[in-house]
Image (cartoon, grey):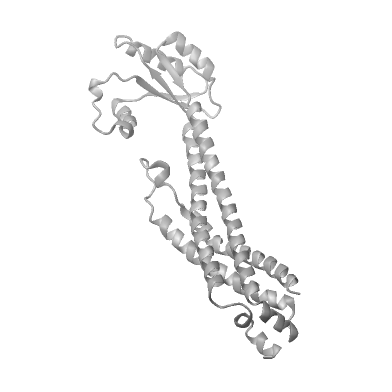
Amino acid sequence: MSFLSFRESPSGRVVPPSGFTAQLTVITAAAMAFLAVFALALSMATGRLADRWGTELARGSTVRISAPSDQIEAQTAAALKVLETTPGVAEARRLGAEEETALLEPWFGPDLPLDTLSLPVLIDVQETPDGFDAEGLRLRLAGEAPGAVLDDHSRWRRPLVRAAERLRLLGVISLLLIAGVTGGMITLAANAALAATAQVIRTLRLVGATDRFIASAFVRRFTLRGLSGAVIGTFCGMIAIALLPKADEAGGFLTGLGFSGAQWLWPLLIPLLAAIVAYVATRVAATQTLRRLM
């Protein structure tokens, strides 16, 4: 065997074309890419959720009026008058029976007998961009309509948005962990392949092959294995995401887990990133192992 003939087919002579290391690299890359698709979908879905909750609740408030039946209308009228004269309130509107039913339906079902229940009056309050003084409004309502309670949604909005933001951070951390695990497994596979071909490597050195040339053969082969495995895993992950239920108003977060519009292009970067991780991991492993074999 001459150095020229080796150079014509380097990968087939230096790197084992099949076997445990090849299967381990491809399977690891495919599994990690599959998980990365879901981690990316989680991160983007929670990002959309945080934006939607923040936008929908930021400028909305509710006034709830609970009073004896003979005072409910008078206190409702007084509360509406206070809201109409409050700076920062763009609109105040009493919700009808059908709207209250729609609010309670997700919790109690469509057959809720409202006519037998004593429900409070709800007033929907929309803020201007500048907003209003919530504490001042509460004091005015307490004086004019003692049964009126202002809920500016802040106690609900902040924990929900905070939870969504933490879930988005969790998705990013998951992607970093997946990249680290992928690099570690490919490093182990490359070390195993290098150790298995130690005698071949020594022979190649005797006929003139440089360590850089031998390392490049391993890097090229393992990068391609990582890329091909990641393509398979990403494709399967995108199909699984596409088969999830579509987002709707009732489903909320669980049915909204996925990609929207141009976000479907983001998973296509996963095979490229997997190839980069495989390249770096194999390059480091090959350089260190070849130094030990000197």
Task: Tell me which residue sits at (35%, 25%) in the image.
Answer: 95
What x and y, as percent, mark residue 44? 51, 48
171 vs 62, left or right, is: right
Quadrant assignment for the N terminus: bottom right
77 vs 200, left or right, is: left
Task: Tell me which residue sits at (29%, 25%) in the image.
Answer: 97
Residue closest to the eye, 52 or 278:
278
Q: Residue furthest bottom?
A: 1
Residue closest to the eye, 164 or 20:
20
Q: In the figure, 99 relative to 137: above or below?
A: below
Q: Quadrant of residue 165?
A: top right
Residue closest to the eye, 222 or 201:
201
Q: In the figure, 37 relative to 93: above or below?
A: below
Residue closest to the eye, 82 or 25:
25
Q: In the figure, 55 relative to 277: above or below?
A: above
The reply to whether residue 208 is in sight is no
What x and y, as percent, mark residue 263? 50, 54
27 vs 288, left or right, is: left
The reply to whether residue 287 is in sight is yes
Task: Tell me which residue sits at (73%, 75%) in the image.
Answer: 212
What x and y, as percent, mark residue 25? 55, 67
Q: Quadrant of residue 20?
A: bottom right
Task: Tell me which residue sits at (69%, 79%) in the image.
Answer: 201
Quadrant assignment for the C terminus: bottom right
What x and y, as percent, mark residue 246? 38, 50
Q: How many marks?
A: 0
